[in-house]
Amino acid sequence: MNGRSRGVLGFALYTQRRWSREDRAMLETVRRQLTLALERAESVAHLAEERRGLAAANEELVAFTYSVSHDLRTPVRHVTGFVHLLRQTLDGGLSPKAARYLNVVEEAAGRMNILIDGILQVSRTSRLTLSPGPVDLGALVDGLRRELRPGERERRVDWAVSPLPVVTGDADTLRQALRMLLENALKFTRTREVARIEVWAEERPDEWALFVRDNGVGFDPRYTARLFGIFQRLHRQEEFEGAGVGLANVRRIINRHGGRVTAEGQPGGGATFGFTLPSAGRVVGTHAAPSTAGAGG
């Protein structure tokens, strides 16, 4: 194999006989199958070694990111503190231009704090220990809707939530992922007179797929690959707040569960975000969140 002898395949006969053409063909077939099996085993071992190396490198990177993010807190805090002291020292003697400059510094420091929070959030998610168990997605969505209801005041939000399954996973991190998807749906439908948010699940041969669809501002499908990257934003900060880490966190959580994330959208035509979870040991849940309409969902 690969130009090297890996072993000897021997056959012993208990009677004297001449090898026929069919015998030789059979022996050649066995030899080829054994060689293929050895190659597959070597490939699997090589991939496992690479995976261990990548896991170790990723763990080091996460630890480094966490440490650096904490270290950045101090200089940002100093900038904010000295701007405040400068305002007090001048006590109203600031010119309009100087006041504008200080406002820019404060806003930049605030933005930096938001980015640091985002980095720490992603880092914490990567370091969390998962505790797999039964997770009722319907109950999770119901609870999250109650939590998010205060943000729906003075808005009309129509929810359409289909019966959702019970899956196997880590309840806390799956709750984070679902909360981010629902918060995004509420945020990006803010400009709509009536926001409509749909949540449903699809059972597939080896997995469950859950989707959240909204009728919000959507996005250009050419940039779909960027959506789940950290600090990637397709809308201006002035239009929609955020640090661009939420969907990156969703991807990390779902990847750690052995699933994958998806996104579809059109500018002005809404967006659909989804994720899959392996269905090993699945139990179909009977919990169904009722569809409601009106302000506050």
Image: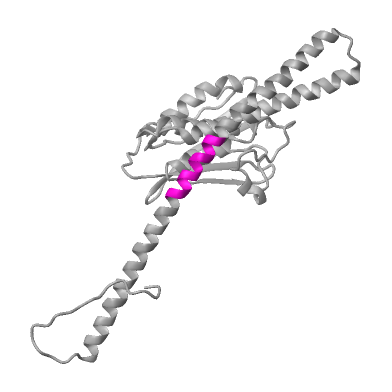
Residue 101 position in % (x across, y down): 84, 23
Residue, far front: 4
Which is nearer the eye, 122 or 268? 122
Does residue 126 appear in this view? yes
Indicate whether 205 appears above or below 190: below
Question: Looking at the rendering, in which quadrant would you find the N terminus?
Answer: bottom left
Residue occupying the point 34% across, 39% down: 284
Question: Looking at the rendering, in which quadrant would you find the C terminus?
Answer: top right
Predominant secondary structure, magenta span: helix
Residue occupying the point 70% across, 27% down: 111
Which is nearer the eye, 68 or 178? 68
Residue 174 position in % (x across, y down): 45, 34
Q: Which colour scheme is used?
A: one colour
Indicate whether 80 appears above or below 201: above
Does residue 161 appear in this view? no
Residue occupying the point 37% across, 50% down: 206
- For the record, the magenta segment spans 52-64
Residue, far left: 15
Q: Is residue 190 left or right of residue 257?
A: right
Indicate whether 287 appears above or below 280: above
Which is nearer the eye, 110 or 283? 110
